[in-house]
Image (tube, rainbow, N blue to C red):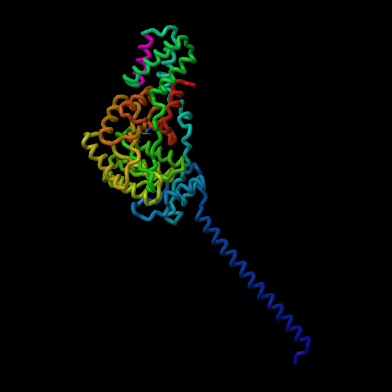
Amino acid sequence: MRGPGAGRRFAHTEAVMDILILAVVLIALVAVGAVSGLVVSSRKKKQLPPPAPPSTPTITAPPAEPQVGEDAATTAEEQRRTIEEVGLPEAEAAAPEAPVAEAEAPAAPAIEVPEPTAGRLVRLRARLARSQNSLGKGLLTLLSREHLDEDTWEEIEETLLVADVGVVPTQELVDRLRERVRVLGTRTPAELRTLLKEELVALVGADLDRSVKTESGADTPGVVMVVGVNGVGKTTTTGKLARVLVADGRSVVLGAADTFRAAAADQLQTWGERVGARTVRGPEGGDPASIAFDAVKEGIAEGADVVLIDTAGRLHTKTGLMDELGKVKRVVEKHGPLDEVLLVLDATTGQNGLTQARVFAEVVDITGIVLTKLDGTAKGGIVVAVQRELGVPVKLIGLGEGPDDLAPFEPQAFVDALIGD
Ligand code: GDP
């Protein structure tokens, strides 16, 4: 028989056992918690690997190659949100479909945040230095002469013609200036500068609509086709335009329909990757029209804001060009009308550029002009001539090879850059 002492001991032993069991359970719970915490944090780490340092070269697995028709895991909307929310997004955020084996697969390229577009022309005004010297300074010097005689007016005309303003616009400008100077009577350098600037702005056209139309007005993306002969800067411009749009908060799909030039699709894809825009491409030498069609289809599927289509401009024969571009246009329009057709012209080519403009205008309805390489020429007057030639406004100008060297064209800022404030 156990006495009361034995009973108390037993009860005591039971209590000790209970405490021990409780402690074991608690330790087990803490251990499980810690392990799962590690798993969660390691998962988190996988989802958000640290961003590659900016100096790291972007030799990376391409962000999931856009396959037309595939169920895109990264929608354009997601890409845009990523840029907005994360700033410099993670590799995985840019390409969630990239292989999981991180050690083997290099990270996708770091996505850049392009510069805002407002005030670009003002920022880049020094790039017009050559035009500024020959046109702006030349005109001001001539106008500042003691006597504005017939010879001086002829020299003014010549200066405008050399700067590629074109014969008819030059005559108009000189006539108006002569008249205003006559009416004004006295003239100070400041007055002359103001007159000249006013007349130049009027010549360039202050009230033309220069916005690039990138909205379809429906639920579908706006579709922009970029045309021009090879070498003018068409692919570069398409890439820069994608950046402009992304900078303005729009999501973009690129269509590499220049299948003629070997490197064009790679070049365009690189531009796209830098801002998180997908590129739809096909085999080299493939059918440009079907790539353009697929690009728009992909844009619709992704809910993108804008589809930009780079084309090949082979001016071998007008019929050939017409067949090719005409087909691209027709096929794209199966999805809906084109919202903008931008003709890219190299400002350094002068009359040659005007001839190209004429041919393209016969083949497709050009709705806007992009003048590239204005940084490398004294012939800024081409802006006036080409607008007159086509009756279509210059909407964008290229002022360098840098990624953000494409500026919306603003007549007043352009004239201020040429003549000075
Ligand atoms: P594409 O054949 O018409 O597509 O021409 P690319 O886009 O390949 O451009 C041809 C060359 O012109 C490239 O070296 C570009 O960097 C250069 N380029 C394009 N736009 C400009 C510009 O505005 N200024 C300068 N200086 N070079 C430019």
The answer to whether residue 118 is above or below residue 192 is below
Q: Quadrant of residue 381?
A: top left
Query: Magenta segment: does it hold 156?
Result: yes
**Which corner quadrant of the image does residue 355 belong to?**
top left
Q: Which of 199 and 286 is in front in this view?
A: 199
> Is residue 229 in view from this perspective?
yes
* Residue at far bottom of view: 1
* 397 lies above or below 16: above
> Where does the N terminus fall, quadrant-wise?
bottom right
Residue 135, position as x, y percentages in the image: 40, 19
As drawn, the residue found furthest toward the front would be: 183
Picture residue at 50% right of the left edge, 56% below the top = 46
User: Is residue 190 in the magenta section?
Assistant: no
- From the top left corner, tell me how far across and down residue 94 is, in percent: 45, 49
Q: Does residue 171 appear left or right of residue 35 in this picture?
A: left
Residue 282 visible, this angle: no
What residue is rendered at 75% in x and 86% in y? 7
Residue 311, above or below 419: below
Magenta region, mostly helix, strand or loop?
A: helix
Q: Is residue 291 above or below residue 314?
A: below
Query: Nearest the camera: 279 or 326?
Result: 326
Residue 261 placed where, x, y %?
A: 29, 39
Ligand 1 is found in the corner quadrant, namely top left
Look at 54% across and 62% down and name the residue there. Answer: 39
- Tell me residue 192's x, y (percent): 46, 15
Q: Nearer the viewer, residue 405 or 50?
A: 405
Question: For the magenta stretch, what is the residue range?
Answer: 151-164
Nearest the eye: 36 or 82: 82
- Total marks shown come to 0
